[in-house]
Amino acid sequence: MTQLKRESPLPLYHQLKEYLVERVENGEFPADKPLPTELEIINQFSISRATVRRAMHDLEVDGYIRRIPGKGTFILRTKIKRGLSRLTSFSEDMAEHGQVVTSKLLDFDKRVPPARVTEKLGVPTDHEVTYIQRLRLVDDVPIALNISYLSLPEGTFIELCELENVASLWSLLEQKNIPIIEADKSIESASADEESALLLEMPAGAPLLVVKGIVYTTGHVPVEYHKVISCGDRYRYSLHLDR
């Protein structure tokens, strides 16, 4: 599209926003580079400054751009896409997009989980499970905090060195003959508290996506309860449905 459709029922600012989003997503406007100036966009599309500013406002709210007074408007990192139509790990999804995943281990121990987690895992209220907290990075950029409670079969253990040498926790479980078969998940929004904001390198109060889930191995036996806290402006889920 080189011109906006003035006969369209869609407002001009919305058409302009979609035009710019498409070019951000296809890499024509790369991350951390400036967008064309307001005047350049006004001249290209013969639209008002108010229309341009409304489109820019919506892009900023959606996490695509950052406006810096006196310097310009800059593209933020395009949002990472994850599908919901099949069960895959974070590492597998990122590898499909050609992106490098690394993890920083923040906490690893045995502990009694909260009551809601013991209920989901089907363990006694005083039973200790393996607790893992990791910061997930994509191309060295913090993307998500991953908290896992693991109810492992008797005689199965995870060592610190194993976690430090693998990107995917699910791959490690499968190496230990614990195949990941199915999962139940929920997705909700939240705001970053001071701790998550610091780790994810974002302002306190910024939007987050929170995915909570219970993962099952063979026989519908729960093996992991996880909570994944993701940057709302760097991450999104996609869904394909057939009828």
Image (cartoon, rainbow, N blue to C red):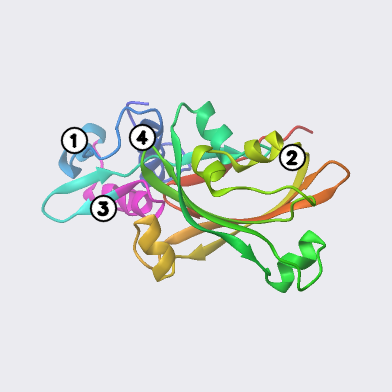
Distance in Å between CA atoms under marks 4 and 1: 20 Å
Which residue bears the numbered disc 4?
A: 24
In terms of sequence position, does the residue under pointer 4 or pointer 1 come before the other?
A: 4
The image's mark for residue 95 is: none
- Name which residue lies at 31% across and 27% down: 28
Which residue bears the numbered disc 2?
A: 180
In terms of sequence position, does the residue under pointer 4 or pointer 3 come before the other?
A: 4
- Name which residue lies at 56% across and 34% down: 93
In terms of sequence position, does the residue under pointer 2 or pointer 4 come before the other?
A: 4
Q: Is residue 74 visible?
A: yes
Position of residue 71 measured from the top left corner of the image (x, y, whole percent): 13, 49
Mark 4 or 3: the one toward you = 4
Q: Residues within 10 Å of mark 3 (few under 14, many from 20)?
A: few
Q: In this picture, is 84 found above or below 70?
A: above
Mark 3 or 2: the one toward you = 2
**Relative to 88, is 232 on the left or the right?**
left
In terms of sequence position, does the residue under pointer 3 or pointer 2 come before the other?
A: 3
Which three-letter amino acid code belongs to the residue tagged 2? Answer: Ile
Which residue bears the numbered disc 1?
A: 43
